Image (cartoon, coloured by chain):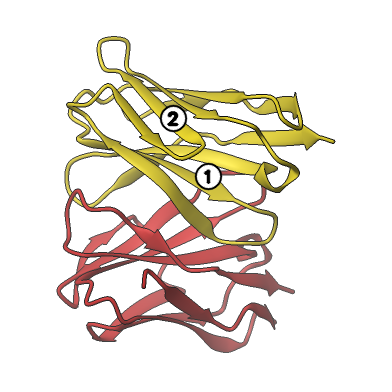
Chain colours: A red, B yellow
Amino acid sequence: DTEVTQTPKHLVMGMTNKKSLKCEQHMGHRAMYWYKQKAKKPPELMFVYSYEKLSINESVPSRFSPECPNSSLLNLHLHALQPEDSALYLCASSQVPGKETQYFGPGTRLLVL
Amino acid sequence: GEDVEQSLFLSVREGDSSVINCTYTDSSSTYLYWYKQEPGAGLQLLTYIFSNMDMKQDQRLTVLLNKKDKHLSLRIADTQTGDSAIYFCAESIRTNKLIFGTGTLLAVQP
């Protein structure tokens, strides 16, 4: 089983709202990732968690706040977003951090009004 | 540098072979990947190749790697309409990063 699940599938939020994206995997992977993908562009790495600790933050604005409550779950907390933050947010996981194959979830399509 | 380039668009007829090309610049990459993304969906891992290999075949998919020229290709035999999607190559480099190519939109005409 190489399944990564994400909820919700779609999200519409105003610029003053607070919302969270959720990602889950039960493959025993110890590295989890958040990517942002704009239309017709490749995914851009946002954050990497390695053994439940934040190991990479690609200079992401503080209105995005990641959290890794345990080795199976990854959250992305959203607050005071801008319309340009509208995108597909993809979660991925890999067995161990480093040069291991990453498996992606279906994504959450976010629209900020 | 960390640039991975792909041609933007490829159109083929159903039943023909498709060849999608990718060039990368980081010679330290160890694995190179092909992902498929259908409209509105996440990325599906298709196949990968280790950098010390020059070819890998997996059913209808053939990956060729020319490490000297830093060139990677994906050949899809007997292309079907269900193969229509965006295809991304990606290289894994130091730390935990995947560097994605610009993506190639494959359109399969019936």
Which image quarter holds the N terminus of chain B? top left
* Left or right, residue B108 beside residue B72: right
Between disc 1 and disc 2, the foreground one is 2
Residue A43 screen position, x and y as percent = 49, 50
* Left or right, residue A6 beside residue A15: left
| Mark 1–mark 2 distance (CA, rounded to whole Å) | 22 Å
Q: Secondary structure at mark 1?
A: loop
Q: Residue tagged by mark 2? A: B62
Name the subunit of mark 1: A
Of the pair B93 and B82, the residue shown nearer to us: B82
Label 1–label 2 contact, CB within 8 A:
no
Q: For the residue marked with disc 2, what is the amino acid?
A: Thr
Discs 1 and 2 lie in a common subunit: no
Above or below, B101 relative to A69: above
Residue at 67%, 50% in the rendered image: A39
Of the pair A84 and B24, the residue shown nearer to us: B24
Q: Residues within 10 Å of mark 1 (few under 14, many from 20)?
A: many
